[in-house]
Amino acid sequence: MSSTESKNFDAIVVGAGFAGMYLVHRLRNMGFSVRCIESASDVGGTWYWNRYPGARCDVPSLEYSFKFDEQLQQDWQWPERYSAQPEILEYAKHVADRFDLRKDITFNTQVESAHYDEDGMQWKVATNKGENLTAQFCIMASGALSSTNYPNIKGLKSFKGEMHHTGAWPQDKKVDFSGKRVGIIGTGSSGIQAIPMLAEQAEHLHVFQRTAQYAIPSRNKPMDKKEEREVKANYKAFRDKIYRLPGAVLRPENVKSVTEAGPEETEEILEKAWARGGTGFLRAFSDLMENAEKNAVASDFAKKKMGEIVQDPEILKKLMPDYSIGCKRIVLDTNYFQTYNRDNVTLVDVKDHPIDEITEKGIITNGIEYELDCIIFATGYDAMTGALTRIDIRGRNRATVKETWKDGPQAFMGMAVNGFPNMFTICGPGSPSVLSNVITHIEQNVEWISDCMSHMRDNGKNCIEVTRESEMEWSAHVAELGDASLFAQCNSWYVGANIPGKPRVFLAYAGGFPAYTDKCDDIASNGYAEFNQVS
Ligand code: NA7
């Protein structure tokens, strides 16, 4: 498209990750014209950017994949139980080829602004390439964990060595750590996946840890061919079953309360869950996430396991979390704690002595300068809202999303925001998204949104906007469930605590995927009564 050309579409989609890709496919099949804008050079979203060593999904591949096309799910073969980033990216590219998606995606282009034209009842979108597009609908498929967070550390730009963020890893070259002194800041999911791999390559690895983390062994393994055959023999029933589970992920559920089991049985159940590995550990009992007291049984067990691995008692002390397991997003690991037994790894605790400064040569904390050749920021994201507040999005009365959400995000079902007519968000605040199997969630959101657009077309409606009352009611419900959960008690990105100045609001819907989808279905069957619709 030439830079001065103005083009009109039924929908503009921002982002060509899994959400954007499925939107292009479905909207096109429903007869809508669509243009997707993507800043990367290809599809894949999260899996395009997160190429750091060790990047891997913690939802099993047979579940973390599209179900909308039977032949696709039959044809694709996943090599491992939990797929590594390269396989997931290959899958995304395959989907793009298979459904010829790229022809409706503009790559290497950023959306700079999206402004709603109230009179024309359409969105005006401008890109950094000087393109001006208009569309009735603007759909933000820009990701819940895509807006990278670089901590505001003094001197950050003065470092003379290499710096990389795990969520914006170089695309065009393999980063070589051999013979290098590497520092990594952050021990969340990304850090814990990268650390064992970096330690194998680097001359020396310094891990700068602010908050100690729990990690459960993933027990990743090659795909069990028998299991794959069984799933594929009746994939629909398998997907339907998952769809009705709280996190849209298959986990061995124990219906027993932790209070019902004696000490021996408790130990036996936890041992079994630990040996199985995976996030299902938190469901070893039905109520581990109910309160800190019940949770302590699992937390203490996980700490005992760390103690069996880490040899140095001083290091072990630093690695011990002081909060409930699962309160921060649970992390799966492969040889994470074992890494601290290596001679070329140093754990630097920056909790009591935060990083003072980054200098030309390295990192200073507690009066010591650690000289480094490379610094890796595994410092996470401005979760769930960052991708929306960083773009100049203006709705009615030219109000921006950023200003509208200054006291915390308010949204309806994570898909609509009052004041922003004809705008939809995928996996936005107030949706279960990050607490669930995100691909399943994405498919549900895409189908709900495209059905809503179809409803409008069939009923001659030009504009749809969620009422403030519906949005407030849903947001209050989200907050009530979130505040009552253990999640709200830790400083994590779930509550925006990782971003200085971000209002502390529990961002996801903790009522489970089935309750969420039931409510979405009710809204659609009632003709979208929670929305004002204008002809
Ligand atoms: P996370 O889970 O947000 O982890 C970020 C880590 O970076 C975490 O350990 C932070 O410590 C640490 N951090 C952030 N800022 C600093 C500063 N200034 N100093 C020291 N340490 C810092 O991000 P991930 O990328 O690992 O994972 C995000 C999600 O992506 C993950 O949960 C999956 O859903 C996929 P903190 O804990 O805040 O003290």
Image (cartoon, rainbow, N blue to C red):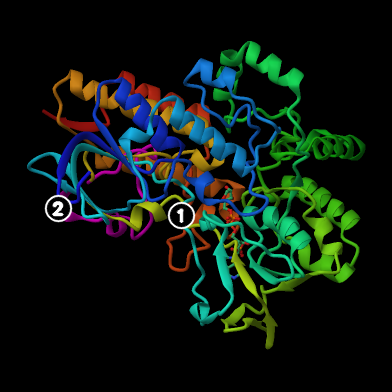
424 to the left or right of 125: right
- In the rendered structure, which disc, 2 or 1, sits on the residue that comes first in sequence? 2
In the picture, the quarter occupied by the C terminus is top left
Q: Looking at numbered disc 1 in the image, what kind of residue is underneath it? A: Val
Q: Residue at the location (35% across, 58% down)?
A: 390
x%, y% of residue 147? 44, 56
Residue 307 vertical placement versus 15 (above, below): below
Q: Residues within 10 Å of mark 2 (few under 14, many from 20)?
A: few
Q: Residue at the location (45% across, 25% down)?
A: 98
User: Residue 505 got which mark?
Assistant: 1
241 to the left or right of 286: left
Q: Is mark 2 within 8 Å of ligand 1?
A: no
| Residue situated in front as seen by the camera: 329 or 30 | 30
Asked if one can make out residue 516 in the rendered structure from this viewpoint, the answer is: no
Secondary structure type for disc 1: loop
Instruction: Report the predominant secondary structure element of the magenta stretch.
Output: loop
User: Residue 397 got which mark?
Assistant: 2
x%, y% of residue 341? 86, 63
Q: Looking at numbered disc 2 in the image, what kind of residue is underneath it? A: Asn
Residue 360 vertical placement versus 490 (above, below): below
Q: Residue at the location (52% across, 49% down)?
A: 483
Give the foreground label among 2 and 1. Answer: 2
